[in-house]
Image (tube, coloured by chain):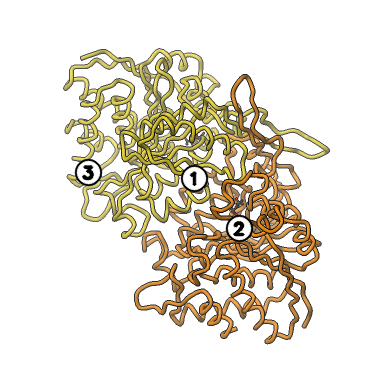
Chain colours: A orange, B yellow
Amino acid sequence: MGGYKIAVLPGDGIGPEVVAEAVKVLGVVGKKFGHTFDLRYADFGGAAIDSSGSPFPPETEITCMNADAVLFGAVGGPKWDSLDPAIRPEKGLLALRKAAGAFANLRPAKLFPELADACYLRPDIVANGIDIMVVRELIGDVYFGEPSGIEVRDGERVGFSNMIYREHEIRRVARVAFETAMKRNKKLCSVDKANVLAVSRLWREVVTEVSKEYPEVELSYMYVDNAAMQLVRNPAAFDVIVTGNLFGDILSDEAAAITGSIGMLPSASVGGPDTPGLYEPVHGSAPDIAGQNLANPVATILSLAMLLRYSLGLAAEADAVEAAVADVLAAGYRTGDIFREGMKRVGCSEMGQLIADRV
Amino acid sequence: MGGYKIAVLPGDGIGPEVVAEAVKVLGVVGKKFGHTFDLRYADFGGAAIDSSGSPFPPETEITCMNADAVLFGAVGGPKWDSLDPAIRPEKGLLALRKAAGAFANLRPAKLFPELADACYLRPDIVANGIDIMVVRELIGDVYFGEPSGIEVRDGERVGFSNMIYREHEIRRVARVAFETAMKRNKKLCSVDKANVLAVSRLWREVVTEVSKEYPEVELSYMYVDNAAMQLVRNPAAFDVIVTGNLFGDILSDEAAAITGSIGMLPSASVGGPDTPGLYEPVHGSAPDIAGQNLANPVATILSLAMLLRYSLGLAAEADAVEAAVADVLAAGYRTGDIFREGMKRVGCSEMGQLIADRV
Ligand SMILES: CC(C)[C@H](C(=O)O)[C@@H](O)C(=O)O
Ligand SMILES: CC(C)[C@H](C(=O)O)[C@@H](O)C(=O)O
């Protein structure tokens, strides 16, 4: 029994709806297990731009930094797409990740057996299952590298962004990946483009050095282009993947897409011991279906389970949430994105309630 | 009727076998259409490292630059993987592309109707067909950007590679992409990461400028992570994709993989009017099956068709080669990689002969 501070950032598009359902579930967890969750809502993303001119205002940063963990929905939408990049919703997300020191982004791409027919791959490939954990470095690489900009040189515009990694940045995320592999099937695949890029050669060198500390983990290397292929051809061959920020952005989305259940996939971004972990669904803000009770809240509810497990150390509570999700799926309830003939179609809030009822 | 000089670079692994079959087909094209093809073989890749210490020796460069077009197989293999990156087989490939000024890499990802069951995607998605042309910029971006290296700074190693594009580099490949779209379904999707990267913002700006010259082409933009998803979810939505070197490397391999027929896919890399075009299969050197008459020569034979069409302007000859390939597939002949029950299994040289016989 304990009291926990959680910063809640609903964000844009379907963000507020799916976060509301996760909060509903959290309420039940609190009652059932006797915890107090002190929720502190803050503006973020497009919503914050509208109210204060910045996607990640100082008050939001303070709220987040004082919390044990941050739960958020999604950011962005056409309304803010034409804004100066420096104050776009995405900038807020990057600033939040950086402020929280959240260098390791854990993105599971898992096929739920009940949703196997939603998978985009051929049934004989699906039959082997998909259960991949992508560990993506989150606060380095070309996302934050300097110099970066657009300049006129020799009479023409030149755009440049620096793909850069420091040894310690690679080492710390590699450790998280090896630790993750130790808790799973002890297979780690490090993805880079070391046949072309200097930055990737350092990546590979440092990962190889860290591997000495984990002799039980079977380490392999793959070029990013080949990884993009193998995810389609034989996803069952992967256990844990570790890679840089940009390659991780692409490959984790590809891996999520093949499961066919992007509305189901959570993510955790964790960093140092003194900074809050960030928890968010893998999907985006889906402005086209926002406010219509159509969104699938499961990814956010499973993100909440990760929050309970990783940031608060509440494993039994996390298990209860995950089991409730599995129950509801087994009982045939589906939001529109995963609906199939013969199943029971429900809206976002009904789905949240069904899960909350089963915790 | 004419005489043409073609540089032939068999390269490593299965390269020599598949190139031999393309040469067989070219011989028949020459006889049937009354052309003289003057073939000039040159060492390249690992084979060249072994014979001369460099993956792209000066004599090979001269041979290529004096040719009307270059046909090559594949490079690389475990034998050369531990070499200093500066003299690895891949370096030769990059140097050849640069020397030839081959800034536009055309990579079709097409589902052959006869091979629809080899496709890795769900049958209901395959039913919509896949016919995508990826136009990848090939001699810029982080592949060639400076500064690049590994250095010690503040007591730790730092690896960096510069993702950089100049206006004219974007403009020229964008034009090729728009021209390509004009000959197809007039839909172009430009892929970047403009919500995060300065270099991508310039990319998007310049592509938008070029689009004014092609009012008939419907231009859309997509972030690279989303493109990696949409290729799996709805590949039929794409016609032509234009993107930078790195994103193109990843997405064209993903697009090729979903067709399930990577042994079937050709590519062309073209540049200025005075430099030779380069033609190569999309697949790699497959050292594990090299020298066993198991490789699929179709990708190289279709690369030859692209060579005839784009570099030599021999459209009827290219059509004849493509029709011969379609005939052989329709007749049920398959190499091991695309073999299915009920088909006739053949080796690399038989496949080449069957196609040559039907030209
Ligand atoms: C919105 C964008 C900045 C972000 C990223 O690229 O990291 C998103 O794609 C993600 O993967 O969380
Ligand atoms: C071998 C390698 C350098 C090359 C590339 O990355 O361009 C290959 O992957 C390709 O796509 O042709």
Dot 2 falls on a residue whose secondary structure is loop
Q: CA distance from mark 2 to mark 1?
A: 31 Å
Residue A245 x, y percent position in the rendering: 63, 48
Residue A164 falls in image quadrant: top right
Q: Are marks 1 and 3 on the same chain?
A: no
Q: Give the percent coordinates (x, y) of residue A91.
A: 66, 50
Q: Are marks 2 and 1 in contact (CB under 8 Å)?
A: no
Q: Amino acid at mark 1?
A: Asn
For the point 61% across and 46% down, which residue is it? A83
Badge 3: few (under 14), some or many (20 or more) residues near its Cα, within 10 Å?
Answer: many
Amino acid type, mark 3: Leu
Q: State the residue lying farthest toward the right.
A: B154
In the image, A131: left or right of B196? left
Is A276 displayed left or right of B164 in the figure?
Answer: right
Q: Which residue lies under the disc numbered 2?
A: A75
Does any atom of ligand 1 lie closer than 8 Å to the CB of label 2? yes
**What element does badge 3 sit on?**
helix
- Whether ligand 2 has any atom under 8 Å from the Cβ at mark 1 is answered as yes
Q: Residues within 10 Å of mark 2 (few under 14, many from 20)?
A: many
| Cα–Cα gap, marks 1 and 3 | 27 Å
Cα distance, mark 2 to mark 3?
49 Å
**Would you name the residue on which mark 3 appears?**
B329
Q: Element type at marker 1? A: helix
Which sits in the foreground, A308 or B10?
A308
Which residue appears at 66% of the width and 51% of the height? A137
